[in-house]
Amino acid sequence: MSLQLSADRRYLTTERGEPFFWFADTAWSIVWKGKPDQWRAYLDKRVQQGFNVLQVTLLPWRWEYLDVEGNRPFHDGDPGRPNDAYFARYDQFIGIAAERGLHTCLMLIWGGPRPLLPAVHFTTGQAVSFARYAVERFQRHPMVWSLSGDAEYVQEVDKWDAVGAAVQAADRRGHLTTNHLPPSMNWHFLHHDAPWHDFHMLQTGHRRGAISDLAALPLAYYRHTPVKPVVNGEPWYENHPSRDTAEFGPNFTAFEARYAFWVSLLSGATMGHTYGAQGIWNWKRPGDDETQHVAGPAIGPPWSEALLYAGAEQCAIAARLVRTLPWWQLVPTPERVHLVPEINHRTQPEAVHQAPPTATMAPVCATVPDRLLLAYLPAAQGQLVVKGLAPGAWRARWIDPRSGAEHALPAAVTAVDLSYCPPAPPSTDDWLLLLDRA
């Protein structure tokens, strides 16, 4: 089953034309480091949680690495001589995933012009030939292609355009194609006009300093023309150390995992979302050497522990909620919500409309015009103001993003200026406000 672009090019659909909400996990290293019984346990858990896409690298993260059975991808390190024993493991994994209804987004040649990573070892001709080989081998499965990942593509645009054209020509089943960006490439709108490129896969990365990009990037790409779907393909990973300083840390928590989900989605990455976790992306095994730094393959808890993180379950709760809504019609409308810190609007109504919004951790909002409004409040420490709410009967609910529990509110009544101030949520944690037509 191949995914397709919707008619308005805002989201993906199944072959039957049904909206497909992308909910992915970054299982980059699972195939070359894991074993079939581990794959099955991992896949069964993710299917139970509602994930439907796996982002996986076809080559090891470093050129010199072997797979768990001692195989190299290529005989004698020659990119023109694929080792069937290595790629047969991918046949098996992708098949097992497909049996469970999962799509595999396969990163074909990881790394670009970066030392130690695979892509630097490929000439343009070799990269084109290998991309054809991979597409022809795996296209019978439910696939999405990414040419590479984490690369400075602007240094080699012609190379990657040639690879993209080769993928498009070799794929007889019309699977979608993208290219996974590193944070340094985010504001380039790279590949936007390339005929082989179907949707944008952003990466906001693993620094707390990237917090503003979680909203700004999806919104900029959503508004870019011509229209293309957008997904945040690598936000903050749960339990991954922050990389703002040389020392790294502290680790990202379940809160930051769900924050990344809701802020990215409601700010324009309405195609879906990708979750990530330390211990899963690097497929940490008991006994793996931990002497390498945070970017190395061995840092974090074993994959079996990382599989149980609270943030993954909370993102799954988020995806289940979104799928009950007409999410494919959501339009990012950040101007519709406004947080007034620590002001009692009942005694100071004029202050609600005069105070400036908070500069950090601001609420985000998306709407289906005149039908639904969904706002995420990262911290309930002030008065949320909704603006431009059409008169009429609106059902109002606070939703707990940790559990999915709903807290019903009185029907929303708009003021003369079409504003609405909901009652405070049950706690000062993060909350979702859902307004829909009664």
Image (tube, rainbow, N blue to C red):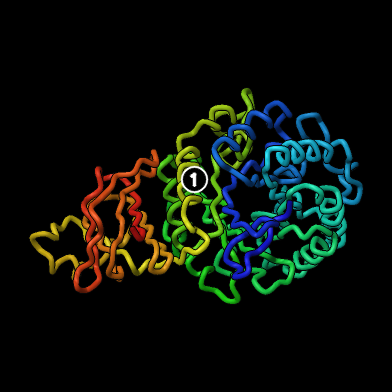
Classify 10 Å Cα crowding around label 1: few (below 14), some (14-19), many (20 and above): some
Residue 435 appears at what percent x and percent y? 34, 58
- Horizontally, residue 28 falls left or right of residue 82, namely left
Q: Is residue 27 above or below residue 347?
A: above
Q: Residue at x 41, y 64 (%)?
A: 367
Residue 423 appears at what percent x and percent y? 21, 53
| Residue nearest the observer in this picture, 412 or 186 | 412
Res 382 quadrant in image: bottom left
- Horizontally, residue 388 falls left or right of residue 170, namely left
Res 355 quadrant in image: bottom left
Q: Given the current orientation, which residue lies at the most extreme top position?
A: 287
Q: Given the current orientation, which residue lies at the most extreme left position?
A: 347
Q: Residue at x 45, y 62 (%)?
A: 267
For label 1, the residue is 320
**Amino acid carrying mark 1 in the image:** Arg
Res 100 quadrant in image: top right
Q: Residue at x 42, y 49 (%)?
A: 259
Q: Residue at x 76, y 54 (%)?
A: 119
Q: How many marks on residues? A: 1
